[in-house]
Amino acid sequence: MRKKVIILITSLLIVTTLLSACGNSKYKVSSDSELTKEDMKILQKNFSNLTEDEEIKLATMSFNMTEDEYIKFKDDLKRLHAEEMVSKGLMTKERADKLFEESYDYELRKKQGKLTEEEKKEDKEREKAAEEFNNEVAKYSAAKDKIQENLNNNLENKYDGYIIKSEVIDTDSVSNKVIIDTDVMTTKDITVGQMTTIRNEIAQEVDEVIEVDRIEISLKLNSEDKGTYTFTKHKGWDKDIQP
């Protein structure tokens, strides 16, 4: 009897091990795949547990998949897509699943080389638009760093007795604007004219790096809010505000 129990336990352990191995084999990266082990970890996570870098990787991961990989990981991609849409409040799971299926069918036919001539033409146009958009985003991202560097180097300690701390909050390629928070720290008296000069100099630093339609500056004096000032191309400063 004891021998039978031992044999039964051993058999169960073997089966469990085999099932585990089979389950994990789905996420093993083949030597000729463009996917990585990190990609495999992402596919097994919930969207809420992804880091910002992992979210970016996920967004482009399917482009690196072969036809077979795209089919194999469909359920993971679909699940993560729905989780993202629902968590961001963009749509219901049902709507997200429907849109995924429509997109999946197109992308699968593209990988299989089965797109119609009209679809191929539209795909090229989309790729061109996406490339232009990505280039614009990259340009604004680089501009954000350069503007921050210039504000630190050229303005922060420009005036004796004043420390002008500026932070570039955003460089928005879609709205074509730059948003900056500035805090003028000083123990001295400061005039309205001096604050206006500082505001104008911030706008000039932006303009020397990138041409935008709007510059929004949230201005503080010793951390006390002094209002948000908007500079619009060809119109100057917002006429409704005080200097």
Image (cartoon, rainbow, N blue to C red):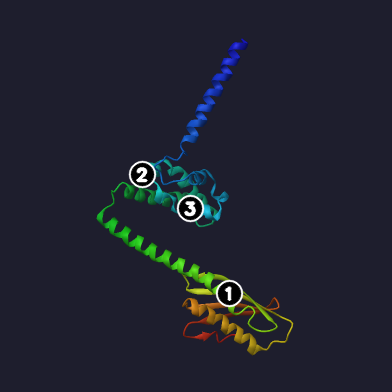
| Secondary structure of the residue carrying numbered label 3 | helix
> Closest to the observer: 153 or 100?
153
The amino acid type of the residue labelled 1 equals Ile
Between the residue at mark 2 and the residue at mark 3, the CA separation in whole angstroms equals: 19 Å
Residue 226 left/right relative to 129: right
Q: Of the residues under marks 1 and 2, which one precedes in the sequence?
A: 2
> Which of the labelled discs sits on residue 180, or is there none?
1
Q: Of the residues under marks 3 and 1, which one precedes in the sequence?
A: 3
Circle 2 crowding by C-alpha within 10 Å: few under 14, some 14–19, many from 20: some
Residue 149: give x, y in percent of width and height.
56, 73
Q: Quadrant of residue 135?
A: bottom left
Q: Is residue 19 visible?
A: yes
> Which of the labelled discs sits on residue 57, or is there none?
3
Residue 124: give x, y in percent of width and height.
31, 60
| Secondary structure of the residue carrying numbered label 1 | strand
Question: Which quadrant, please, contains the N terminus?
Answer: top right
Please tell me which residue is depicted at 65% across the width and 88% down the height of the picture: 192
The amino acid type of the residue labelled 3 equals Lys
Between the residue at mark 3 and the residue at mark 1, the CA separation in whole angstroms equals: 29 Å
Q: Is residue 37 above or below residue 146?
A: above
Residue 196 left/right relative to 207: right
The answer to the question of whether label 2 and label 3 lie on touching residues, with beta carbons closer than 8 A, is no
> Closest to the observer: 30 or 177?
30
Question: Which quadrant, please, contains the C terminus?
Answer: bottom right
Q: Which residue is mark 2?
A: 67
Q: Quadrant of residue 134?
A: bottom left
Please tell me which residue is depicted at 57% across the width and 83% down the height of the picture: 201
Please tell me which residue is depicted at 46% across the width and 51% down the height of the picture: 96
The answer to the question of whether label 3 and label 1 lie on touching residues, with beta carbons closer than 8 A, is no
| Secondary structure of the residue carrying numbered label 2 | helix
Q: Of the residues under marks 2 and 3, which one precedes in the sequence?
A: 3
The amino acid type of the residue labelled 2 equals Glu
